[in-house]
Amino acid sequence: MSDDFSEFNELIKNHGSANHDDLLAAITERVSFLLDSDIELLMSYLYRLDVLEVDIDFILNKQKDIPVNEGLGKLIFDRQMARQKYREQFKQKPIEGWDEW
């Protein structure tokens, strides 16, 4: 999976931290590639990232306003931002004495 996301690693390596537009563009580009080449792998990624099936269905089948690659890219981006926010909100302090075992 790390090879699949080399463009994200490059963005972060080159810029220290990429802005939201750059990340969303990279995600959307990858989604476009996977839509054309391996949709099963894309669906597997969406499942593993915990993107809601109802949201995926809406983007694929019920809306016609935005391109599918952009819609799925935005779902992935939003999910990852929510996960990051959750991690920061519930960050645990190291357990004292843990390394003494």
Image (cartoon, grey):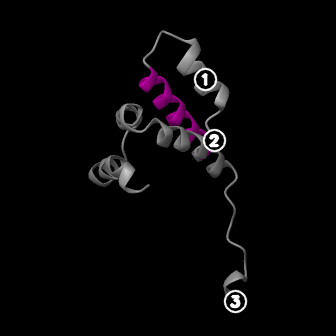
| Residue occupying the point 55% across, 12% down | 63
Residue 26 on the magenta span: no
Badge nearest the viewer, 3 or 2: 2
The residue that label 1 is drawn on is 57
Return the disc, 1 or 2, that comes first in the chain's sequence. Answer: 2
Residue 81, x across and y down, in percent: 55, 39
Badge nearest the viewer, 1 or 2: 1
The residue that label 2 is drawn on is 50
Badge nearest the viewer, 3 or 1: 1
Return the disc, 3 or 2, that comes first in the chain's sequence. Answer: 2
Specify the segment rendered in magenta: 68-83
Question: Where 95 sits versus 3, above or below?
Answer: below
The residue that label 3 is drawn on is 100
Is 15 in front, or is 44? 44
68 left or right of 47 in image:
left
Residue 74, x across and y down, in percent: 49, 29
- Verify CB contact (< 8 Å) between mark 3 and mark 2: no
Question: Where 43 sits versus 72, above or below?
Answer: below
